[in-house]
């Protein structure tokens, strides 16, 4: 068996040899051109692979370089210097004896010192010269500084391959093009004078005076524990936080000999002697009327960290408007800083002037306010929680906007302590609240509008009387427990008597007779839902929470100034101008140059004249609700209003109320007043404002 197998295997091998020899005999030799073609094809395939790989590698490199350039630029625009440092090459930093940490610090010092902000990069380009092993990155930068818009700067650097990635090559030329590693930045600024806020006659309501500024001198604070102890003493003495002081000292522009302001103090304030603290006399904002106009005028103060974050062009020590018109018109009042930003050598020699601007003083703003009227109205309301609005009903000029209680604007501006500020905040009478811009139910003063709508609609006939029995009334049993009440039990009431007695039932009935549609259409002639375009924060006047009078009870209540009506005293004054101005509603203005919306005919002249005469009679008639004003030696038209704010929880006690008084010059329409006292009746408002109304002629 073994022999046979080997023999068989040998035979197969011989057969294979024979077959191969046979094929060689039959095959032909390949021609040279075929061999060359095969070689060329093989080389082409190999070459194509190499070329393809090269193109792919170049595209990959360009993409990587572009990504790092984009990251660098995005971080630059955000002024995120830490993010910038992460894509910067160590080699480029080492070449100029910098580290990533010192690069970050350099940006913070230079850009922080000049107030760099709003960086915008344009014309970004990444190119590579043939055969170069790096890319050229070029771009332009626009920015704002503490001196305004800086002229556009051109920048250029390289993006080089590091290992398998790319990084941006950095030097100080990327901060400013002419800046060398050892150069320094210098900025000198001059602050323009803040514009004055003036009354209609040019008397100052906000102007420049002097005060003291307390500041730290870093070189005198000591080091380590001594510095900590000194700052703690400063914080306790001046009622500031240690953390705030430390943050001020960390600013980029601060040097050992800098004066670092941290607190303003009034001119007559006591100046404690504390190590490390110096004082500088500085211009300070003063308010001649102070509390009498503080809600309106507001006050200024030194910028906070939050202010600088919102507007990086601001620097510590800058003064801006914090509230009232000081804040609203801050851009106009503040003007523009002047000064120069320089690049200097390490020896302090001038190298390049980066920016130079001329100082511009702020703009004066003239109001329509009359200082004498403002002060007199405030004096009359002192001790109350109330407000008074005086307006010229023929041209819309606001003559006085008073709110009591008030706060010390001079103290707020010069530097109020946290205890003093907290006392204001916790005062239950809310001295920071501008009551002339807060919404209230207007009470019976609103009856003049109901009367105007009814007269124009023809549903109110002045000579017709209503038969009314008792002090309460309801339309029918569908009203349930709800009833309209009145103060005087008069069995027969016409329009004039309804004003004189301030009869709620009369006006509720008249509104129901004209119906919700007619009444609401009439209200459209007034200012509900409108923006009065005043530089004062306020909500629009509202008819009701839903904007409609969708029930008889709500319609009845609205007719005599209750329901869900909300109008602030300014809006009330504007709404009542038609009755002192031939039926025309005049829009308000607070600045001499303010353009207002065109006046509109809210009620016919005939109806306005009837209501005006009836309001004169409420003063002149002995039983009139405003008869106390009859002592004034001039014809006055007036309407009182007492609006319920909360029902008494004790049976038999009166509800809580707000008292209102509408009064205007019935002879010359020289003024219209709406005054209000919280928690009192309208009689209290007459008592408070009568002395002033008696001498209104002296203010004209």
Image (tube, grey):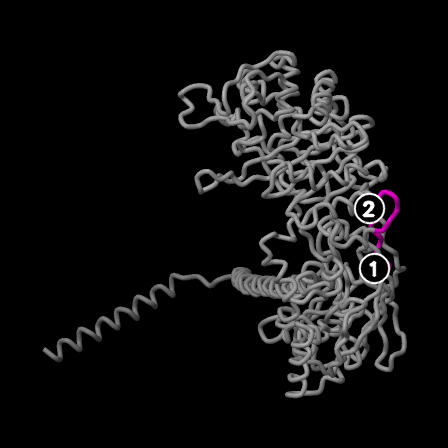
Q: Secondary structure at mark 2?
A: helix
Residue 336 on the magenta span: no
Q: Secondary structure at mark 1?
A: strand
Using the image, determine if residue 452 lies above or below residue 437. above
The rendered magenta stretch, by its main secondary structure, is classed as loop
* Alpha carbons under labels 2 and 1: distance apart: 45 Å
Using the image, determine if residue 619 lies above or below residue 436. above
Res. 489 visible in picture: yes
Q: Nearer the viewer, residue 128 or 30?
A: 128
Whole-percent x and y of residue 504?
A: 56, 25
Counting residues from the N terminus, which is met first, the one under dot 2 or under dot 1?
1
Instruction: Tell how many labels.
Output: 2
Q: Nearer the viewer, residue 448 or 141?
A: 448
Res. 140 visible in picture: no
Dot 1, how many residues are within 10 Å of its Cα: few (below 14), some (14-19), or many (20+)? few
Whole-percent x and y of residue 165?
A: 59, 71
Quadrant position of residue 270: bottom right
Labels 2 and 1 touching (C-beta < 8 A)? no
Residue 202 on the magenta span: yes
Q: Which residues are magenta?
A: 193-204
Whole-percent x and y of residue 77?
A: 68, 61
Instruction: Give me the residue at 67% from left, 88% from top.
Output: 226
Quarter of the figure that contains the N terminus: bottom left
For disc 1, the marked residue is 151
Residue, far front: 622
Does 475 sit left or right of 567 as displayed? left
Residue, far left: 1
**Which dot marks residue 371?**
2
Quadrant position of residue 256: bottom right
Does 164 sit left or right of 184 as displayed? left
Q: Which label lies toward us, 2 or 1?
A: 2
């Amino acid at each position: 068996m073994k022999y046979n197998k080997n023999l068989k295997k040998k035979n197969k091998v011989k057969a294979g040899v024979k077959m191969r020899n046979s094929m060689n005999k039959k095959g032909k030799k390949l021609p040279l051109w075929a061999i060359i073609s095969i070689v060329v094809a093989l080389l082409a395939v190999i070459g194509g692979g190499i070329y393809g790989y090269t193109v792919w590698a170049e595209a990959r490199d360009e993409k990587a370089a572009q990504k790092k350039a984009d990251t660098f630029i995005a971080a630059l625009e955000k002024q995120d210097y830490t993010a910038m440092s992460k894509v910067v090459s160590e080699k480029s930093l080492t070449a100029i004896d910098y580290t990533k940490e010192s690069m970050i610090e350099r940006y913070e010092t230079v850009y922080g010192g000049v107030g760099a902000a709003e960086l915008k990069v344009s014309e970004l380009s990444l190119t590579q010269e043939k055969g170069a092993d790096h890319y050229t990155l070029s771009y332009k930068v626009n920015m704002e500084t503490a001196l305004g818009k800086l002229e556009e700067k051109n920048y250029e650097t390289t993006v080089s391959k590091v290992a398998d990635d790319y990084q941006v090559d950095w030097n100080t030329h990327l901060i400013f093009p002419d800046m060398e590693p050892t150069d320094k930045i210098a900025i000198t600024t001059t602050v323009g004078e803040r514009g004055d806020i003036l009354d209609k006659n040019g008397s100052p309501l906000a102007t420049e005076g002097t005060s003291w500024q307390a500041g730290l001198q870093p070189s005198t604070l000591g080091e380590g524990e001594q510095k900590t102890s000194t700052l703690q003493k400063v914080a306790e003495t001046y009622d500031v936080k240690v953390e705030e002081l430390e943050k001020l000292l960390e600013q980029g522009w601060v040097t050992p000999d800098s004066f670092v302001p941290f607190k303003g103090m009034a001119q007559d304030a006591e100046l404690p002697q504390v190590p490390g603290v110096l004082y500088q006399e500085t211009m300070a904002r003063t308010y001649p009327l102070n509390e009498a106009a503080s809600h309106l005028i507001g006050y200024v103060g030194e910028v906070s960290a939050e202010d600088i974050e919102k507007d990086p062009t601001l620097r510590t020590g800058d003064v801006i408007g914090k509230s009232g018109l000081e804040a609203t018109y801050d851009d106009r009042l503040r003007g523009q800083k002047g000064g120069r930003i320089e690049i200097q050598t390490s020896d302090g020699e001038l190298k390049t002037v980066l920016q130079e601007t001329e100082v511009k003083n702020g703009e004066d703003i003239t109001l329509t306010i009359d200082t004498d009227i403002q002060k007199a109205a405030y004096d009359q309301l002192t001790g109350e929680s109330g407000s008074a609005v005086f307006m010229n009903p023929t041209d819309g000029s606001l003559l006085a906007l008073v709110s009591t209680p008030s706060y010390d604007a001079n103290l707020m501006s010069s530097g109020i302590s946290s205890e003093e500020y907290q006392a204001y905040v916790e005062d239950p009478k809310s001295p920071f609240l501008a009551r002339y811009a807060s919404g209230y139910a207007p009470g019976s003063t609103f009856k003049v509008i109901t009367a105007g709508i009814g007269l124009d609609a023809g549903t109110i006939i002045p000579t017709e009387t209503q038969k009314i029995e008792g002090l309460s009334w309801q339309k029918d049993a569908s009203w349930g427990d709800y009833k309209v009440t009145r103060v005087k039990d008069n069995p027969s009431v016409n329009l004039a008597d309804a004003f004189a007695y301030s009869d709620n039932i009369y006006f509720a009935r008249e509104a129901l007779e004209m119906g919700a549609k007619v009444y609401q259409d009439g209200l459209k002639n007034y200012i509900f839902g409108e923006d009065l375009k005043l530089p004062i924060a306020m909500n629009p006047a509202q008819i009701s929470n839903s904007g409609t009078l969708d029930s008889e009870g709500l319609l009845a209540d609205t007719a005599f100034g209750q329901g869900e009506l909300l109008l602030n005293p300014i809006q009330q004054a504007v709404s009542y101008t038609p009755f002192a101005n031939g039926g025309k509603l005049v829009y308000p203005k607070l600045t001499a140059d303010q353009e207002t919306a065109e006046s509109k005919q809210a009620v016919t002249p005939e109806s306005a004249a009837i209501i005006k005469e009836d309001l004169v009679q409420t003063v002149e008639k002995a039983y009139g609700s405003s008869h106390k004003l009859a002592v004034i030696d001039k014809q006055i038209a007036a309407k009182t209003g007492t609006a319920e704010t909360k029902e008494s929880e004790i049976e038999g006690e009166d509800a809580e109320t707000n008292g209102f008084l509408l009064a205007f010059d019935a002879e010359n329409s020289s003024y219209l007043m709406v005054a209000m006292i919280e928690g009192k009746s309208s009689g209290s408002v007459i008592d408070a404002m009568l002395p002033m109304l008696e001498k209104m002629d002296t203010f004209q």
